[in-house]
Amino acid sequence: MTQPSVLLVEDEPAQRAVLSYNLESEGFRVIQAENGEEALLLVDEDTPDIVVLDWMLPNVSGIEVCRQLKMRKDTRALPIIMLSARSEEVDKIRGLETGADDYVTKPYSVLELMARVRTQLRRARPGSVATQLDFNDITLDTENHRVSRADKEIKLGPTEFRLLTTFLEKPGRVYSREQLLDRVWGRDIYVDTRTVDVHIGRLRKALCQHGGEDPVRTVRGAGYALG
Ligand code: CA
């Protein structure tokens, strides 16, 4: 399995850095472009497996880039996920039928975007992304949203599911409450850090419903980790 590559087109350096960091930690090779012209040039030089494309770009807009890529025979099959600032814009681009494969509306959680990227990539390149995450007797399937522990099914709410996905991607890594907020809830949404504690409590309860030790570790003064 070769490392999948993603072309990330975003003009805001801070957003580009966050996304790039997260895509890299998901195992992607990231090719960065800060505008549409650069994106179109880079596609020829180094064809990616997937494109994450911001809608609001200077000069050549994301829509235009999308349209051009979808018109060309050699890039037509390339999955494109568009990032859009407001839901009205999503409707607008839907109406324009640019041919984007998926849309994510800002503010989005990084985890949500990563899940969409994996989904698109799975469609385009079956077998290129793992769908199952494991830690000891815990198994999580990112595709059909199933969780089990010691072969017994565990029912989780959507937030607890995203929390567990985050932990399972890097078992042992300590996440601060702020980092969990960023990944699970999205950085632009105001949620009190105590909310994290509430959902961690629910996750623990759910994971221990059929017995077994609590796999979530509280790291005093730092946050939470799995194992
Ligand atoms: Ca932008």
Image (cartoon, rainbow, N blue to C red):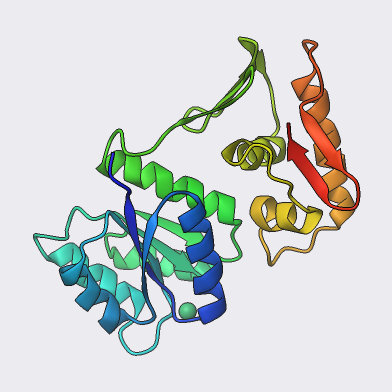
Q: Quadrant of the C terminus?
A: top right
Q: Quadrant of the N terminus?
A: top left
Residue 49's place in the image compared with 95, above or below, is above
Asked whether residue 85 appears in the rendered view, the answer is no
Percent position of residue 161, x then y: 65, 35
Percent position of residue 182, x then y: 68, 58
Q: Residue at x 28, y 44 (%)?
A: 2
Q: State which quadrant residue 47 falls in.
A: bottom left
Q: Residue at x 43, y 58 (%)?
A: 103
Please give left or right for residue 59 compared with residue 182 in the image. Answer: left
Asked whether residue 136 appears in the rendered view, the answer is yes
Q: Residue at x 44, y 81 (%)?
A: 11
Percent position of residue 73, x then y: 8, 60
Residue 116's place in the image compared with 165, above or below, is below
View extreme (bottom): residue: 59
Q: How many marks?
A: 0
Please give left or right for residue 112 compared with residue 183 in the image. Answer: left
Q: Residue at x 56, y 67 (%)?
A: 18
Please give left or right for residue 130 compared with residue 225 in the image. Answer: left
Please give left or right for residue 5 compared with residue 105 in the image. Answer: left
View extreme (left): residue: 73
- Please name whichever residue, 188 or 181, is drawn nearer the observer in this view of the structure: 181
Percent position of residue 127, x then y: 30, 33
